[in-house]
Image (cartoon, rainbow, N blue to C red):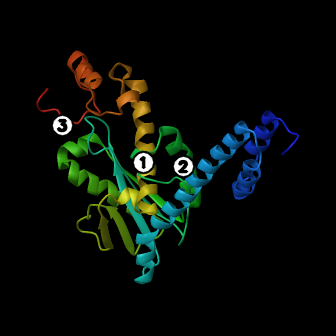
Amino acid sequence: MKGKSVKEIKEIIESVKEDEYQKYIDILNQDDRKSVQNLAKSLSKKLEKIKKEEERLELINTFENEGYKNGYIYIGGVDEAGRGPLAGPVVASVVVFEKDTKIPYVNDSKKLSEAKREELFDIIKEKALDYGIGIVDNDEIDEYNILNATYMAMKKAINSLNKKPDYLLLDAVTIPDLDIKQFPIVKGDAKSISIAAASILAKVTRDRLMYKYDEIYPQYGFKHHKGYGTKEHYEAIENFGITPIHRKSFLKNVL
């Protein structure tokens, strides 16, 4: 790197592949210029982040691997989005991966930016052996209550799979009246790649629906709060009343 300007070195570093990071860190650290050594530090931080993500990806296959060790072969992760909002559906998803699948940055959907969820949405569908999505609307939520509606959405998602799973990992719930072995995991959407992936599919699917509802009912701000009980949402309900997508059972105090 000697004889090259800091700007030239920076341009080279930006095109370096991840498996060459350590090599370039060692080279940059030999340069006496502080600005070049700072580039080495920056690259070291990137490498450390990559290594931490690799370690995390190993850990979030733990529950799937235990399932395989116990003889299960078609393992699905299940999660939902939208249990808490005042409006819109509850959406559930199930995802089945091949053994040892690793998708960088797949995590609990709540820990990811909307842009990252959107990016991972297509990657997950492409990498999955199978996936299903189930949607239960606000009227059914009012009729059956949100917990039962969530189970209904999960069953819809599972029934839409091409092949029935023999083992399900879930985020701290057990679906009643289901003849599949289930294993609930507390905070499972951050501990299992299958559940994490399902949480992303469910969240992105529901958010897209709420964007469509925002076009129909723009005065409610659904594109901002996705139906959750924000100040903006309650004020819209007070000013304009409720829409056909509101959950009346969630709004007994304001109706």
For image coordinates 28% across by 31% down, the residue present is: 244
In the rendered structure, the answer to whether residue 87 lies left or right of residue 45 reads left
Q: Which of marks 2 and 3 is nearer the N terminus?
A: 2
The residue indicated by pointer 3 is: 250
Element marked by disc 3: helix
Element marked by disc 2: helix
Give the farthest residue toward the top: 239
- Location of residue 23 in the rendering, given as x and y in whole percent from the top left corner: 74, 57
Element marked by disc 1: helix
Separation (CA) of disc 2 from disc 3: 32 Å
For image coordinates 45% across by 53% down, the residue present is: 107
Q: How crowded is mark 1: few (under 14 residues within 10 Å), some or many (20 or more)?
A: many
The residue indicated by pointer 2 is: 120
Screen quadrant of the N terminus: top right
As shown in the figure, which amino acid type bears the numbered disc 3?
Answer: Phe
- Location of residue 122 in the rendering, given as x and y in whole percent from the top left corner: 57, 50
For image coordinates 44% across by 58% down, the residue present is: 132
As shown in the figure, which amino acid type bears the numbered disc 2?
Answer: Leu
Contact, CB < 8 Å: mark 2 with mark 1?
Answer: no
Contact, CB < 8 Å: mark 2 with mark 3?
Answer: no
Query: What label sits on residue 109 in the rendered view?
Result: 1
Judge by depth and name the residue closer to the eye, 20 or 24. 24
Separation (CA) of disc 1 from disc 3: 24 Å
Task: From this view, report whether residue 26 is shown above or below residue 142.
Answer: below
Q: Quadrant of residue 190?
A: bottom left
In the rendered structure, the answer to whether residue 3 lies left or right of residue 114 reads right
Task: From this view, report whether residue 7 is shown above or below residue 189.
Answer: above
